[in-house]
């Protein structure tokens, strides 16, 4: 029925189209399932969103097409940009001056992840032209998933903070190098300068857009009450404008939003209640983003060879991030036990990885089929498995306010008492 909407078209004629009706019902179902996952299974709502999207993709949900383009691509970029702007706003550069080993830890785990995934895929006889983009995609952890897990479990503590910072920094590296590599992928060149130029263009355009976004936000916070509904709407509109501008000029919209949040944090030191400002609008975009990612990823073709490659990629990625975080843990102020939980919390891979994969697919559709054939199943697996691992890691670290053994009735009481 889902694959053949013509049957329903003669009975249902919504003004916005049949696809809009399908998406509305799918999001309503995702909202219900997400609530049930958190209420009765003590798991984050994002896992319920991903499960609904996965089932829709496996059943042939026809309202999404790969590669993403048009409104679907913009909404995904906007959802990622909003979350990354918030993540960037949590990073204080002074922290790296007082504890530079955190930056070393970030660079170590990102580099090891790239090398481990690349050489694992080469060992499986995958061409270097395909293994390189997949290694860049695998480099990024998912602050988008981690932010929702932290929010749903109300986790607070050093493991939570360290995992979010490392996931955000790995995303910064992956967005910069992945966006540039997509340009090189479309126009291969033997010249070193022509290989470096896309990196400079992506980074330069993203920095300029980030600076404009930061200045506009700072002016808004000076003139308007941070808790005002109008301020919330203005911020959402500014991020949407920056998303469209960065993509149009050849930069990376999520990277611009991330850098914009980091710049604003340095210029506007006073705390401001970002999550409460956007409220329902941000939650709806986030839900749409996770459902869209899992729906698209679930439509990838599976085979024995693909399953083996995806499994090898996932294992190599998890091991390399664990080793990288462990090696960089020396002198970072965290215990070895905390380092293990940080590495587990960085397991998710979701919307950012899908956006980078989409960039390769748009740059060279035919050549990128092999990349998407491995990347999409890996994204689906690590969105589901990663959310579970991140939740368990924060609980085992003792930083989650929603332990697994608390019954639903007790959890409801605690939530009411904290005002969330």
Image (cartoon, rainbow, N blue to C red):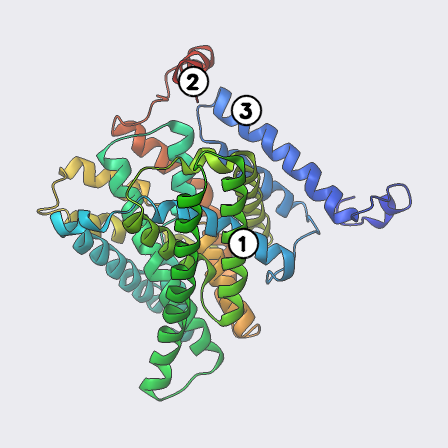
Q: What secondary structure is found at the residue carrying circle 3?
A: helix
Say above or below: 403 vs 1. above
Dot in front, 2 or 3? 2
Q: Earlier in the sequence, mark 1 or mark 3?
A: 3
Q: What secondary structure is found at the residue carrying circle 1?
A: helix
Q: Which residue is mark 3?
A: 36
Q: Earlier in the sequence, mark 2 or mark 3?
A: 3
Q: What residue is at 41 percent from the left and 50 percent from the top?
A: 219
Q: What residue is at 40 percent from the left and 64 percent from the top?
A: 134
Q: Locate residue 74 relative to residue 402 in the image: left or right.
A: right
Whether residue 382 can be seen here: no
Q: What residue is at 36 percent from the left and 73 percent from the top?
A: 199
How many numbered badges does the structure rendering display?
3
Q: Earlier in the sequence, mark 1 or mark 2?
A: 1
Dot in front, 1 or 3? 1
Dot in front, 1 or 2? 1
The picture places residue 99, in percent across and down from the top left corner, at: 13, 48
Q: Residues within 10 Å of mark 2 (few under 14, many from 20)?
A: few
Q: Locate residue 137 relative to residue 335 in the image: left or right.
A: right
Say above or below: 378 vs 280. below
Q: Which residue is mark 2?
A: 415
Name the quarter where the C terminus is drawn: top left
């Amino acid at each position: 029925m889902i694959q053949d909407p013509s049957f329903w078209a003669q009975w249902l004629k919504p003004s916005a189209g049949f696809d809009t009706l399908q998406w509305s019902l799918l999001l309503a179902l995702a909202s219900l399932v997400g609530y049930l996952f958190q209420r009765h299974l003590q798991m984050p709502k994002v896992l319920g969103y991903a499960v609904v999207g996965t089932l829709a993709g496996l059943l042939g949900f026809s309202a999404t097409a790969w590669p993403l383009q048009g409104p679907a691509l913009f909404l995904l970029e906007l959802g990622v940009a909003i979350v990354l702007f918030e993540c960037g706003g949590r990073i204080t550069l002074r922290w790296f001056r007082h504890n530079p080993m955190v930056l070393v830890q970030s660079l170590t785990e990102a580099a090891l992840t790239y090398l481990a995934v690349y050489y694992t895929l080469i060992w499986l006889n995958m061409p270097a032209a395909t293994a390189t983009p997949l290694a860049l995609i695998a480099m990024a952890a998912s602050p988008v998933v981690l932010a929702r897990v932290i929010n749903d479990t109300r986790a607070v503590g050093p493991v939570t903070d360290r995992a979010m910072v490392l996931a955000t920094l790995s995303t910064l590296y992956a967005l910069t190098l992945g966006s540039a590599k997509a340009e090189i992928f479309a126009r291969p060149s033997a010249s070193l300068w022509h290989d470096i130029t896309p990196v400079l263009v992506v980074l330069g355009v993203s920095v300029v857009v980030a600076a404009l976004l930061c200045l506009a936000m700072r002016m808004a916070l000076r003139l308007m009450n941070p808790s005002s509904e109008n301020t919330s709407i203005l911020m959402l509109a500014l991020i949407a404008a920056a998303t469209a501008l960065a993509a149009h000029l050849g930069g990376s919209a999520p990277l611009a939003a991330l850098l914009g949040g980091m710049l604003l944090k340095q210029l506007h030191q006073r705390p401001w209640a970002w999550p409460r400002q956007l409220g329902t609008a941000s939650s709806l975009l986030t839900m749409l983003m996770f459902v869209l990612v899992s729906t698209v990823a679930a439509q990838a073709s599976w085979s024995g060879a693909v399953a083996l490659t995806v499994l090898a990629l996932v294992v190599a990625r998890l091991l390399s991030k664990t080793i990288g975080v462990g090696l960089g843990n020396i002198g970072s102020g965290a215990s070895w036990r905390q380092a293990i939980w940080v590495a587990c919390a960085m397991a998710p891979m979701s919307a950012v990885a899908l956006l980078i994969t989409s960039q390769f697919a748009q740059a060279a559709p035919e050549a990128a089929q092999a990349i998407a054939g491995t990347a999409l199943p890996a994204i689906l697996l690590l969105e589901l498995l990663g959310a579970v691992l991140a939740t368990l890691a924060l609980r085992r670290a003792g930083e989650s306010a929603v332990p697994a053994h608390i019954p639903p009735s007790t959890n409801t009481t605690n939530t009411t008492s904290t005002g969330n």
